[in-house]
Image (tube, rainbow, N blue to C red):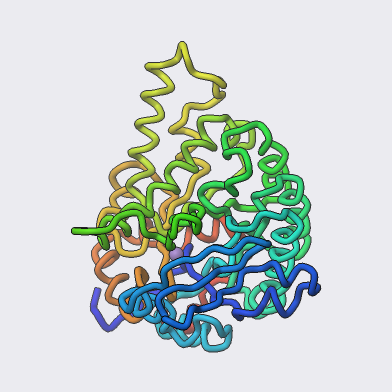
Amino acid sequence: MTEDVKLWASSGDSHFLEPEDLWRSRLPKRLSELVPRSVKHPDGKWETVHVDGQAFRRRLPGIAQEEFYAASYRAPGAGDVELRIKDLDEEGIWAELVYPSLGMWSASFRTPEVLREALRVSNDWAKETILDYSPRLIPTGQVSTMSIEDACAELKRCGELGFKAVFMPVTPHPLQKDYNRDEWEPFWALAEDIGMVLAFHIGTEPVDFNTGGAVGIAYRGPGGAVLNHTETTFGGQRAVMKLVACGALDRHPNLKVLVSEGGATWVPFIADRMEEAYRQHSMAVRPKLARTPKEIIYSQVYASFQHDGSAVAACTSMGYNNVMWGSDYPHMEGTYGHTQMTLHNLFDGVDQKTRDRIMFGSFNELFPGTPALPSAGGALDE
Ligand code: MN
């Protein structure tokens, strides 16, 4: 293995920056007035966010956060499909799962119709702009988790439009029941029926704007930056725990779950803990499962990581096969600008079977029909 060999991998984690006025420009006026907009105060320290008939004031991000945001979207192709493919070619990323950006506002909506229609607009836009542009780009559909009935209707429509995955926030809308509740059963059944992958992205808990919350800020003070980044991973683990413990994945053995950006070694760990709970607390366990938690998790849950030095070992040493690499393009936590170095650090010296699995196999299993990497490009030809 030499450093000048270009490595390629498909990515289970990337993001697209939609036009900021997407909802306002495409929704009927009656609804477009209710989608989020921000009015900055003259002193530059505060803004008022208007969303769905509510208004709340929050402190504007300081310089550090503005720099964070700019760094997160510095890649030329962050919001442009043509430039994006160029970026991917340069980085060595073949196909990618593409998450939305505007969807982070979903939890602040209060009127089911407004959220339903906003996400419908987003899905139509993502189909025209991303899905139809290149089979290398696999955008996630979006559904309202405020209304399960709306979620089912839009999920079905997403399937008809050709989406292969649906973006799921790690916790549902604050006005909705949690994912382990029976109310969600029709949604899980439908997703299995139409072969839609549930794509949970970490760090997508609702933001409580009323308490001045900002995205991804749970801690302040010493160590805050590291604490906040590390904290984002736990929500994905909780979502998986719920879907396993309530029996949803057991009842729907063909339903596949991906947790993006959260690393991989947590999966064997959570599986062990759930096995212990299921066995040692069996007198209290409801519902009973046809397979053990570990069997369910190892067969139906996939996990993407970007830099984690331990992730390959989840596959080679812990028997967990559904490990998938992800670039997190174009975000700051991702590998943009150093993808080749990252791939070499991770995979140099790793056996070919494991590399194939983590760099392509898990991805292709979740998203069948993804075109193969052309071998003429000299990729993987070491
Ligand atoms: Mn990501």
Q: Position of residue 179 (x, y in %)?
A: 58, 39
Residue 382 shown left or right of residue 97 in the figure: left
On screen, residue 163 above or below 181: below
Q: Is residue 358 visible?
A: no
Furthest residue toward front: 43
Name the quadrant containing residue 342: bottom left
Q: Residue at x 54, y 74 (%)?
A: 16
Q: Residue at x 52, y 43 (%)?
A: 300
Q: Position of residue 199 (x, y in %)?
A: 55, 55
* Closer to the camera in the image, 47 or 88: 47
Name the quadrant containing residue 222: bottom left
* Closer to the camera in the image, 91 or 116: 116
* The C terminus - image quarter: bottom left
Q: Position of residue 230 (x, y in %)?
A: 31, 55
Quadrant containing ligand 1: bottom left
On screen, residue 271 above or below 140: above
* Closer to the camera in the image, 282 or 95: 282
Q: Position of residue 93 (x, y in %)?
A: 45, 75
On screen, residue 308 above or below 297: below
* The N terminus - image quarter: bottom left
Give the total number of marks visible in the rendering: 0
Name the quadrant containing residue 154: bottom right
Q: Residue at x 27, y 71 (%)?
A: 344
